[in-house]
Amino acid sequence: MEQSKIAAMMEGKTLTKENIDHMFHMVQNASGQEEKTNVMKHSVFFVGQLPLLDHYIVDLERTRELVGASVPESELADCMDHLLEGLTTQKLLLQKEDGSYMVNTKYEKSIAKVRKIAQAWDLERSQMTEETESRVKKMYQTGTRYYHNGDYEEAAAAFQNTVDMAGYRMGYYSLALMYKDGRGVDRSYEQALLCARAAAARGARIADALVDEIKSLMETD
């Protein structure tokens, strides 16, 4: 399938571990005015996706949840630091005395434009999901049947397919349970937490309690 203009524009500029680390190192190593300007333009896309509270204050808890959907728990703090430090170095974010971060409104027009692009990208992805929704739901139901019949490896494969096909939130949730319990897959609390956070970030509020449960298990393991 041909990549859309929006998808091409967002490539490498989303809130994933690889992209955040890349952005951070670009910021740290930029030399020369032209290179610094290009890095700043690149970094604007990250700010355009940050959830905000009133008065342009960054919602750090929600940001951590979004970043945590693709970053292992052991690396989450460093990745958040890279994101915030990189954007603060670029003066796109300003750190306040109370430790919070706010968007530098000097760049409000640029960030507002990118936010519209990010929203259009989310809409595009959700429309793609709708187009495959019927197949995804059937695949998920197949996985559920396998699970209840004790065919855990087949169930895990089916749930993984729903994630690969459409980033299906309940597919992530079910995989999180399987990684937590070691059913059909090798037990991994790290992978379980990633899947649970991915489910929560996609709107599966049922995953919030699972995130807390897995974190508790990791602390006592």
Image: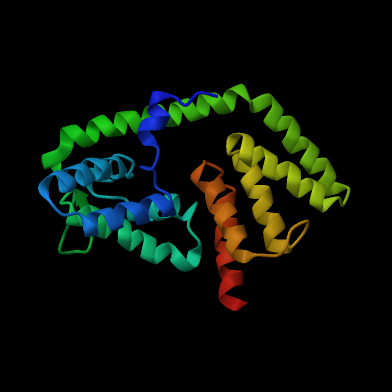
Reply above or below: 90 against 162: below
Question: Residue 136's quadrant in the figure?
Answer: top right
Look at the image and name its color scheme.
Answer: rainbow
Quarter assignment of residue 80:
bottom left
Note whether residue 25 is visible.
yes
Horizontal side, residue 41 vs residue 157: left or right: left
Image location (x, y in percent) of residue 114: 28, 33
| Residue farthest right in this picture | 149
Q: Is residue 94 visible?
A: no
Q: Is residue 37 above or below residue 17?
A: above
Question: For the point 55% across and 24% down, which residue is it?
Answer: 1
Q: Is residue 190 left or right of residue 137?
A: left
Outermost residue, bottom side: 220
The residue at the point 55 percent across, 25 percent down is 128
Q: Residue at x 39, y 43 (%)?
A: 14
Residue name at image x 58 percent, y 64 percent: 190
